[in-house]
Image: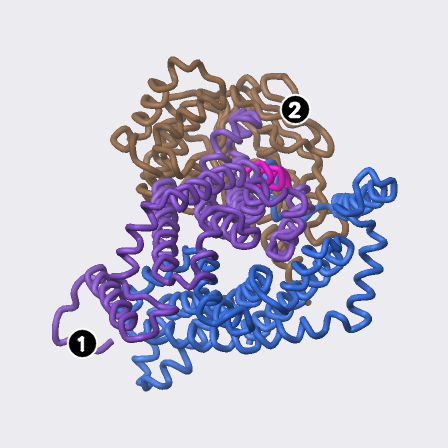
Amino acid sequence: MSAASAAGQALTARLTPAQRRASALVKLSALALLLIVWHFVTVTEIVSPFFLPKPADVLRNFIRIVGSGQAWPDLKVTLFEFAIAGPIALVAGGLVGFLVSLTRYGARVFEPIISSVYAIPIIIFYPISVMALGIGPESKIAHGALFGFFPICLNTIQGFSRVDPLLIRLAHSTGASQRQLFWRIMLPAAAPTILSGVRLGLMLCFLAIIGGETIASIEGIGHRVVWYAEGMQTGNMFAYIVFVVLVAVIMNAALSLLEFRKGRS
Amino acid sequence: MTPLSFRSPPPWVSRALVILLLLVLWEILGRMGSQLFFSPLSMVATSGVTIFADREVLEALRTTAWILAIGFGLSVCIGLVLGLAVAMSRFTYQTFLPVLLLLYAIPQITVLPIFVLYFGSGPASKIAFGVSHGLFPIAVSVVAGVQGIKPLLVTSAISMGATRWQIFRRITLPYLAPSLFTGMRLASTATLLGVLLAELYVSSGGVGHFTRRFGESFQPDKLYALIAALSLMAILINETMRMLERRFSRWT
Amino acid sequence: MTNETGRGAMAETLIKVEDVSHVFPAPDGGGEVIALEGIDIEIGRGEMVSLIGPSGCGKSTLLNVIGGMIAPSQGAALIGGARVRGPRPKEVAYIFQESALLPWATILDNIKVSLEFQKAPRATRDQVAREALKAVGLDAFATSYPHQLSGGMKQRAALARALSLRTDVLLMDEPFAALDEQTRMIFSEDLSRLLANERKTILLVTHSLAEAVFLSDRIFVFTSRPGRIKAVLEVDEPHPRSPAFMTSPKFNDLRNRLYELLRDEVLAAIGKDRQGLA
């Protein structure tokens, strides 16, 4: 027992079993309270159903939208856009990152430029995409690919530049060829950083596509939310938002899984 | 790597050359390609002068700037309070951090129509949407900052008779300053993103509205000029924040 | 229990530990760990006492009970006859294994902040802090930041901070553990000189036999967990002690006796771990 555990507790230190139970209870009761309040204010119509539909209605609409396959055509469009934009972001980001990292000097010249551009909210380029490519899938693909490019590229540069020089010296001392150096040392050492960039980049790409659909589109799951909103169908809009959030959460979980697996091997 | 036969100039010189090359490329490609979607740099620059003389555009810039300022200010205040509340104790940390991260993970863009439904199409919804983007990076950075405090520093302070307030004032606050500035840098970009998203969506004023208008009426020179100005502004804000961040983390 | 108490019992008693036992929940979740069992000791004013024993024997826990940082499951510690119920910043100062200096503040500001914590009068803080730095030979580094100092200098700064609090009692929890051998020697000599000059009562938790013998008036040897006091050794040698003391027959004799006492306990502690592995 060190003195540290006596008074200044680390935030990450384990809770006692009793505290863990209390913690779960607080979370559950907060959720329950939220639902109860939501139900109460809507059932009594303190809040107009136009602003906030009843939780039961949202659930019913959600089941109808998902169950009837009504959401499928829009989801297909969005996934199609992602299926093209994602790989473009991946290949372009990885390739540029790799080329820039070929020399330490290249990384020092280009990395600040790329990270500065990344500070720009990329959404402001979207009107260019729409102007040049129209409001169909093409503009979303371009926008998504651009959004996904940056984290992938930056993490690739960072991954390669932070390979322990000792490992490289070790490889040289054993007479490894350039090819062996890359495949056996550089890539495995940089992989975790690159993969977390890939996860973030693909997720941002997906969200950028939904964002593009929300702002200017005629189809896709992002557009459908707007469509319901403009049609004043608040009940359907809420249900559909739940659906889109769920899709995004599943996408995020799927991408995290990839990083987790690859990162360990 | 391979020894170079000449001495390479310092990186910033090459960097400037690269940027110059890109600008030249912009000019050449602009002159070669279709003038419908793309404009050479020279034209964009001259349009830039005209649009920024335009009263309407200036008004829009001013609107966006103050919406951004309010949104950012609110993000910092709310995010700081939220982060400190979550990091207040081991119990609150382990109970509410997962909730915070869950909320952060929700793609805000999907709830944008709800913001418009509740806050209308005026500045309020833009501010609120900006805050919804800026809030989380701050809160999460603050939590991470407090989490990094060495327990021994607190133990030592307690042994010397420090009160809770003194521990907060003398240990927690200075310790989390660098993280707070990191959070503020991320939040400034995120808030701008949120505000522009809302402006593009409701399209009732502000710079976002004008980019959309110039795009839809096929005026690439004006569109590019506006975007270039916005980009410069974003980079400037980011670099200022980065400088502050470095200033406050000299001891780390 | 072989009791060889001598001088310590003669002096005016400052610290009293009465039948202290401490139990805490096992870190792996199940069950409890008995850290201390039935500790009864008295320490005189101006005495220098070492607590030595195998890892996990509860010596740091005992230190924290005396410092008011841990409330014992049973029994109590008393300082100057008053029961310890919490931190006693006016009477007790700590030195930890790490310096615990605020990294963003200069050495001087660190000490001034400590004096603020202790509620020392504002007007005197600067002067007190500078005097303390002078006492440990760090006055030239008042405006340096902790990361600019070596490990030994940081511990010296921590010592200055503890001295500036002007407490009767100094609790040292393995203060030399992170230092290299040469630095430890110099530090020990300094500490011995300090003992000769000021009548501080010091409790030192250490793993080093040589350190314990060189610095202490009395050495409390702990058993392996649950920690009890196995023996008390007395070192009858006036402070300040010179490096020559370290090569004397008396020193070697004491060191060997200490080693004999500890050997079984360390073996027992390791044996327990081995069983745990099997």
Q: How many marks?
A: 2
Q: Comparing marks 2 and 1, which lies closer to the viewer?
A: 1
Q: Position of residue C181 (x, y in %)?
A: 36, 48
The residue beneath circle 1 is B3
Q: What chain is the brown one?
A: C
Q: Is residue A62 above or below residue C18?
A: below
**What color is chain A drawn in?**
blue
Q: Quadrant of residue A101 in the image? A: bottom left
The chain letter under disc 1 is B
**What color is chain B drawn in?**
purple
Q: Position of residue A220 (x, y in %)?
A: 63, 69
**Start-end of magenta stretch:** B80-89
The disc at residue C85 is: 2
Q: Position of residue B177 (x, y in %)?
A: 45, 39
Amino acid at pointer 2: Arg
- Magenta span: helix, strand or loop, mainly? helix
Amino acid at pointer 1: Pro
Q: Tell me the residue at 25%/71% (across/down).
A: B28
Q: Dot 1 lies on which element?
A: loop
> How dense is the environment of label 1, judged by Cα within 10 Å: few (below 14), some, or many (20 and up)?
few
As drawn, the residue found furthest toward the front would be B217
Please indicate whether residue B176 sits to the left or right of residue C123 in the image.
Answer: right
Residue A133 in magenta? no
The chain letter under disc 2 is C
Please indicate whether residue C133 sits to the left or right of residue B129 in the image.
Answer: left
